[in-house]
Image (cartoon, rainbow, N blue to C red):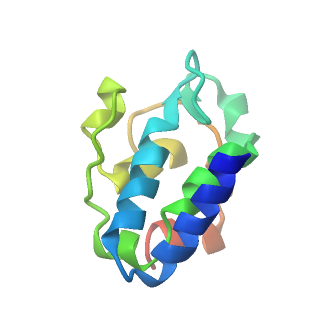
Amino acid sequence: MIALLVLALVAAASASCWSAVPYHLAAKAFAEGTGNVTSQSACKYGSLPQLNSVCPTACLTLLKATWGDCYCNDQAYQPSVSNPFIAGLTVEQIYEVLAGSFGGFQGANCRQYLAQPATQSKWRCL
């Protein structure tokens, strides 16, 4: 619960981009919190289409924590993480994995949420 509050504060700081540090922290948390269905990750991806409609609070918080001016100015930021698949991806590509346009996974948490036009405008910086 405390971690989610910290991420909410980081998200607020990232929205105005007075410093890239909060965005980089949020991006690393997002990357570390994203993993395959066999992991304990907050945001899961894999071969299960039923994941698409499931958007756990922890995953949603990680998604929203990176949104804002800093993300839109630096979508190509690559946080260093332990997951070998995610480690080579930019923050934008991690969003694309969950949204279904990268990686070829049949399911991912929050996929239906990320497909909504209002949500796409935030993670695609439209």
What is the quadrant of the C terminus in the image?
Answer: bottom left
Q: In the figure, is residue 39 to the left or right of 112?
A: left
**Residue at the far front in the pictured view:** 2
Q: Is residue 61 left or right of residue 74?
A: right
Residue 117 appears at what percent x and percent y?
62, 71
101 on left or right of 6: left
Q: Is residue 11 visible?
A: yes
Residue at the image position 52 percent from the left and 37 percent from the top: 33
Q: Position of residue 22 (x, y in %)?
A: 42, 65
Residue in view at x 34 percent, y 27 percent: 82
Position in image of residue 36 (x %, y %):
51, 24
Q: Residue at x 68, y 57 (%)?
A: 5
Q: Is residue 78 positioned above or below 86 on the image?
A: below
Q: Looking at the image, how many numbered discs can be counted on the residues?
A: 0
Q: Residue furthest top?
A: 38
Q: Residue at x 29, y 35 (%)?
A: 87
Q: Nearer the viewer, residue 26 or 64?
A: 26
Res 110 seen here: no
Task: From the top left corner, tell me how far across and down residue 17 is, in percent.
Answer: 40, 80
Of the pair 123 and 71, the residue shown nearer to us: 71
Q: Is residue 70 left or right of residue 43?
A: left
